[in-house]
Amino acid sequence: MTDAVTVAGLVKTFGSTRALNGLDLAVRTGEVHGFLGPNGAGKSTTIRVLLGLARADAGTARLLGGDPWAEAATLHRRLAYVPGDVTLWPHLTGGEVIDLLGGLRGGLDRRRRTDLLDRFDLDPRKKCRAYSKGNRQKVALVAALACDAELLILDEPTSGLDPLMEEVFREAVREERRRGDRTVLLSSHILSEVEALCDRVTIIRDGRAVDSGTLAELRHLTRTSVEAELAGPAPRLAGLPGVHDVRSDGDRVSFDVDTSELDGALRRLTEVGVRGLACRPPTLEELFLRHYDRAGRHAGAGR
Amino acid sequence: MSALAGTGRLTRLALRRERAVAPWWILVIVTLAMAVVSYITRNMGTYEQKVSYTRLIGSGGFLHALGGGTVEPRLEVLATWRSGGFLYVACAFAAVMSVVRHTRREEDAGRGELIGSTAVSRRAPLTAAVLVASGVSLAAGLATAAALIGLGLEPVGSLAYGAAVSVAGWVFAGVAAVAAQLARDAGAATAIGLSALAVAYVTRYAGDATGQHWLKALSPIGWSHLVRPYQDERWWMLGVPLLAGGALLAVAYRLLDRRDLGGGLLPERLGPAQAPRARGPVGMAWRLHRGLLAAWAAGVAFFAAAAAGLSPLARDLLARPSVVVDNIVRTLGMPAGKALAAYSWYMILILAYAIALYPVLMTLRLRAEERSGRAEAVQATPLSRLRWAAGHLVVAGLGTAGLLAVGGLVFGTLFALLVGDLATDVPRFVAGALSAVPAAWCVGALCVLAYGLLPRASAAICWAVWILTAALGQVVAPLYGLWGGSPVEPFHYVGNPMTASSSGPAAQAALLGVTAALLCGGLWALRRRDLG
C-alpha cells in the first residue's frame, strides 16, 4: 500500500523555539490517521508544512507523491483542509464562502454540498459575521467534504461543534473511509473521537513522534491493567520485572504490567490459584497521559 | 500548474471587498483635482492675477516646493502645481493600504491559510492584490483626466496628469508588496509602506526646495512630478515608475517564495511575561492604545518641526508687500500687521484639524473591540460597560489634549529659536494649540454619540464627521472659496488666540457643554443597546 503522507526527520524552528524536532509521520492511502498531541506539540506546524504554507528547515515531507512546498498549488487540487480556528470574510454568506473555496479547489459536488448543508443543519444565506464559532467550523467542513478530495487534512475540526454535530461529522468521515481510496489526517486531542474514527495513530510530543501504529499495536506495546481474585493470600509481585502499582487487599490484587512481562506475572498468580481475573487493555486516555507524563520516564517506551 | 493559478478568482474576491473603499478614494482624488481648478478660475481669473501668484510662488523655495517644477501663469499649470503633490500621495497611499489589506491582513486574520490550502499558487494572493491596487490607481488617473477634460482643460495634458497619478499608485503597490513580505504583521507592513511614502515625499520636497534636482529624480513621487503635464509632457518619464514598480514586484515575489505564510523576514520579539500590576479601565485602555498615541505624537512633532522650519521663510515672504499675501491674510480674518502670527495660527489649525482625527480613530477602536468580541470578554468581568467605555474615552480625551500640547510645544520652541523669543513664544504657542482642545473633543464626542446610537453605521459616520469637519473648516474650505470656513464645524468657534482675537471663554464653555451633552448621549445609548 502506498503512503499518502510521508514525513521523515522534519525540523522547523521559529527563532529559538524548535517547533518540530525530527518528526516522522506516515499516513497510508485509504486510512483515517489520528494525529495526537497536546497544545504546542507541533501538530499545526506539521500541517502547515504539509500544506506548503511553511517551509521545513530540515528533513523531508512528501504529500500525495509530491513536494508540498514546490508543488503546493497542484497538490492542493487533490486535498481539502479544515483549520482549527476558522476565520471567514464577514461580509460574505456561508454559501458564498463554500462556493468560493470550492471554486479555488477546482470545483465541488453540488449534490453533496446540499446534502451536507442539510445534515449539518447550516443556513447558507447568513453572513459569516453572524455565525457562531461552531457554524463557521461547519462552513469549513462542508466546503472541504463537498469537494471530493483524495486527502482530507482536518486540524481539530470538531472544536466548537455540539455532540449532535460531532456525530454528523464522524459519520461523514466514516463514509470517506468506506470509499477506500480516501485518506484522512485528523489532528485532535479529543481521544474518544480518534478512538472512534482512526485506523492508526501517531502521538507527538515536543515536535517528535513518540508512538505510532494501530491502536492494537500501541496497546500491545504498553501496559495491561490486571485485577485478580485469588485462592490464597496474594504473592509478592512488586519485585517482578515490568510490574507496577501493585495494590493488594487480602485475596484480591490489582496491578499494571508491561505487556511483554504479562506471562511471568500471570504465572505467579496461577501458582496461588486464580478464581477470577479481569484484564483490561489501556484506554487511549491512559496511553496519552503516560506519554505526556512530564517526568518523561515512559516517554517513547513504545519504540 | 501555472504560477498564477487562482489569481482570477482571488482578484474578483478582492474587487468585491474593495467596493466599499476604492470608490471613495477615486472620488477624493477627482474632487480635489476639480476643486483646485475651480479655485484658481474663481480667485485668479485674470492673467495679471495669475502672474502675480506665479511671482509669489517663484519668490520662495519652500512655497514653490509644495508643487515644485517650473510654474507658469496658466490655469492648468497652476492647478497641477497646487494639486499634484496631493494627488500623487493620495493615490500612492490608497495603493499601499489596498495591497496590505489583501495580503498581510488576510494572513493575520487566518483566511490566508484557508486560501493557501486550496489550489491557488503561492503568488496568486499577492498578484491579485497588486492587480486590484493598480487597477484602482488606473481608474483614479483616468477619472481625473476625464474630469479635467470635462472642465475644458487640454486633453493631452490631462491624460498625462492622470497617468502621473496612476503610476504613483503602481510604484507604491510595488513598495507595499515588498513591505508585506518583510513585516511581521499587517500593521508593520502598513507602517513600512507609508514610511517609504513619507520619505519619497520629503525627498521630492527637499529636492525642489533646495534646487538639488537629483533628489527629486530619486523619489518615486518626484517621478510623477517630472512628467510635467500641460508643459512638455515627458511621456518617457512614465517608464521609470512603471519599471520600478515591476522590479519591486519581482523582489516581492522572490521574498514571498522564501517565507512561511504568516511569517515575516523581520523577527518577532518576545513581550513581557506578565502585566506589571492590576489595571483599571483606564490602565487597560492605555496599554491597548499607547502605541497609536506614540505614533501620533511622533507624527505631530514631525509636522510641527517642519512648520517651524518654514517660519523664517514665512517671515521674509510676509515682510514683502504683496497683493496676494494681503488678500490671504485679510480673508483669513487677521489684521495685516500680524501676518507672522497669522501664519503660525494657520499651521496650528492644520495640526488641530489633523489631530481631531485621533479621537475619531479611538472611537473606531472602541467599535473594533466590540466587533471582535474582545469587549464581550472584558465586560464579562466585574468591569461595567460604562467604565469600559469611559476608560477608552479618558485615554482618547487626554491623548487629544496631549497631542495638541506636543504640537504647540515643538512648534513654539523651534519657532522661538528661529525667529522669536523663547520666554513669550513657547507659552503662547502651547496656549494657542490647547485652545483647540474643546473643538477636537467635540468632534470625537459626536463620533461617540454615533457609536452609541448606530454602532453598525458608526465607522462610516465617524469618517464622514471628520472629513466634513476638515472639508468645511478654515484650512480646506478656502481652497474652494469658502473663506473663513463655515459655522457648522466646531473649530469655527475657537477664534484666533494668537492674534488676540479669541472668541473668549464663552464660546469655549459652549463647546465643552456640547461635548459633554454628546458624550452623555452616546454613553446613555451605549448602555441601553445590545453589545456586539
Image (tube, coloured by chain):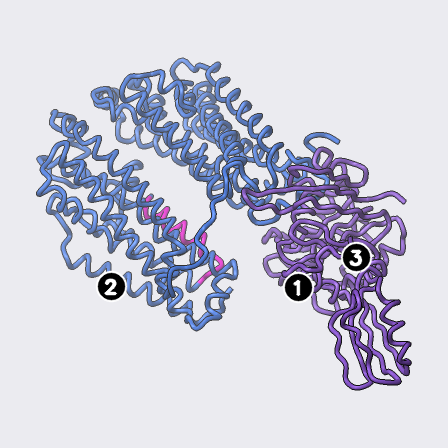
Residue at numbered disc 1 = A160
Mark 1–mark 3 contact, CB under 8 Å? Answer: no
Residue A114 is tagged as 3
Query: Distance from label 2 to label 1 (Cα)?
Result: 49 Å
Label 2 packing within 10 angstroms: few (<14), some (14-19), many (20+): some
x, y percent for residue B365: 43, 55
Do dots 2 and 1 share one subunit?
Answer: no
The quadrant where residue A282 appears = bottom right
Q: Chain A takes which shade in the image?
A: purple
Amino acid type at mark 2:
Gly
Query: In the image, what residue type sits under mark 1?
Result: Gly
Q: Nearer the viewer, residue B453 or B368?
A: B368
Q: CA distance from mark 2 to mark 3?
A: 59 Å
Residue span colored magenta: B454-470
* Residue A114 versus residue B167 in the image, above or below: below
User: How many other residues sit within 10 Å of disc 3, few (<14), some (14-19) or many (≥20)?
Assistant: few
The amino acid type of the residue labelled 3 equals Thr
Mark 2 vs mark 1, foreground winner is 1
Q: Is residue B467 magenta?
A: yes
User: In what element is the residue under mark 1?
Assistant: loop
Looking at the rendered structure, whether the residues under marks 1 and 3 are on a common chain is answered as yes
Question: Which chain shows up in blue?
Answer: B
Tell me where residue B222 appears, x and y as whole percent.
39, 22
Q: Is residue A152 left or right of residue B360?
A: right
Say which quadrant the N terminus of chain B sits in. Answer: top right
Which residue occupies 26% across, 27% down? B44
Of all chains, the one bearing label 1 is: A
Q: Are marks 2 and 3 on the same chain?
A: no
Label 3 secondary element: helix
Badge 1: residue crowd in 10 Å (few <14, some 14–19, many ≥20): some
